[in-house]
Amino acid sequence: MAFSAIINNPTATLPFVGDLPGALWTWGFNGDAETGDGNQTSPKITPAAMATHTFVKVAYGRRHAIGLKSDGSVWTWGENISGALGTGDTTLRNVPYDIGITGALDVAGGWSFSVILKSDGSMWGSGTNGYGQLGTGGGAVTSFTAATGGNFFTKIACGSDPFGSDSTIALKSSGEVWGCGDSTYGQTNGTTLSKLSSGSDIYREVYSAGISVMAIKTSDDQAYGRGYNGTGALGTGNNTNQSTFTVQAGGNTYSKLALGVRFGLGLKIDGSVYGWGAPISGIFTPSSSTPASIFAGPYTDLACNPFDNGGCTASVLDASGNMYSWGDNTLYNFGTTSASPSSSASLVASVSGTTFTRLLKTQSFTNGAIKV
C-alpha cells in the first residue's frame, strides 16, 4: 500500500481542500481503543483499515483520536478520562463517535485535550486545561467550548511534552500566529489566546510540541521557533530559550516540520530530511542545535510521533506512497511483524504491500496513515 501526505493542511473554505477522504489505517498501541476498531486488543500488530469511516484528517493525542470528515463533521474515539473526546462525559469510545459539530475546518489533539477549528474561524476545545491551552479562560471541560480572544483562524496545532507542558498554536488568515497555554519558556504569552508573531510577519504552517512552538514563514520558507531550546530543540544554533520567533540556523527551506520530544525534524523543499535537538530514540545522532542532514530522500511527507514515556517514532513517505519508519518500535509502531528498533542510519519499510496518501501526527504509541 502507499501513502501520499501527512495530515495537516486545512483551509478557511472547506476541510483540507485538495485532500480527498480516505481510509484510516492504524497499528501499534490499542489499550484504550485508539485504533477505533471496537476493541482494546493491544498491541495491534497487523495494520488494517477502519471499516465504514473515511477521513480527510485524523489527529491523535496521548490515547485518543479526533477525526475530520469531508462534510466537516468531527468524530472522536479512545480514552476520555479528562473529556478530551468532547462527548459531554468521560466514557471511553471504542469506535468513532459523532460529537455533533458540523462545518469544522481543522482538528488537533494534545495529551488529554482536543481542539477544533470551525468554519467561521473560531477555536473550540475540550479536555484538560491545566496550562490554559484551550484558550477558554476556565478549567477542564467535557464538551467543546469556544476559546476567547481570537478569531479568523485557518490552521491549528496542539502539543504536549511528556514531562509537563501543553500549548496550542493557531494560524490566522492574515498569516499571524496566535497561541495559548504554558508560557514557562516563552512558547506562548500565557492562558489567554494572543498574538505570538511579530509585526507584519506572515507564516504558512504552525506546529506545537507543548514546551516549544514553531512555524514556517511564507516569505523565505525557513523555520522559526520560540520556547524551550535547552537541547537545541529549535535548531537556532544555540541552547538559549526564545520568547519571540527566532529563525533557525543554516538557512534551510522546508515544506513541513514535525516536532518530537525536545527535538525537531524538517522535510526540506528538495525532499531531504533534517533533524535538530536531542537524539531521542535514535531518531538522529549526535545531538545538535543546528539542523543536520538525516536522509537524502526525496520524500513527500514526514511525521514524528512522540510517546508519553519520552520515546518517539518517525516516518516518511516516498513519491510512490511507500512508508518508512525509524526510532522506537516497542509496540510494533513500524507496522511490521518485528518490534526491533531502528536508528537514523537505517529506515525500515513499513506496512509491506500498502501505499498511503497522508501520514498521521500522533502523540501516542499508536501509529497510522490515510490511504485514498
Image (spheres, helix red, strand yellow):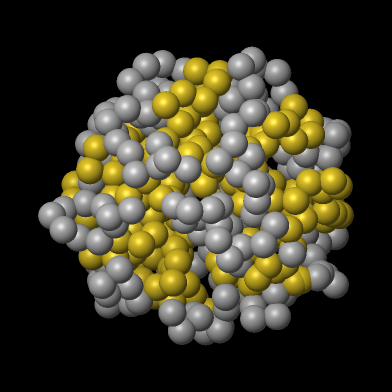
- Horizontal and vertical percent for residue 125? 47, 29
- Horizontal and vertical percent for residue 179? 31, 40
Quadrant of residue 357 within the rendered picture: bottom right
Q: In which quadrant of the rendered image does the C terminus lie? A: bottom right
- Horizontal and vertical percent for residue 367? 69, 52
- Depth order, front residue of 27/192: 192
Residue 300 left/right relative to 176: right
Numbered label tally: 0
Asked if 311 appears above or below 334 in the picture, the reply is above
State whether residue 356 appears in this view. Answer: yes
- Horizontal and vertical percent for residue 116? 50, 38
- Depth order, front residue of 99/315: 99
Q: Residue at x 38, y 54 (%)?
A: 206
Asked if 280 appears above or below 273 in the picture, the reply is above
Quadrant of residue 364 within the rendered picture: top right
Q: As drawn, which residue projects farthest toward the left?
A: 199
Q: Residue at x 79, y 31 (%)?
A: 94
Residue 243 left/right relative to 177: left
Q: Residue at x 29, y 44 (%)?
A: 178
Asked if 265 appears above or below 45 in the picture, the reply is below
Q: In which quadrant of the rendered image does the N terminus lie? A: bottom right
Q: Residue at x 40, y 37 (%)?
A: 122
- Depth order, front residue of 368/310: 368
- Depth order, front residue of 17/136: 17
State whether residue 287 appears in this view. Answer: no
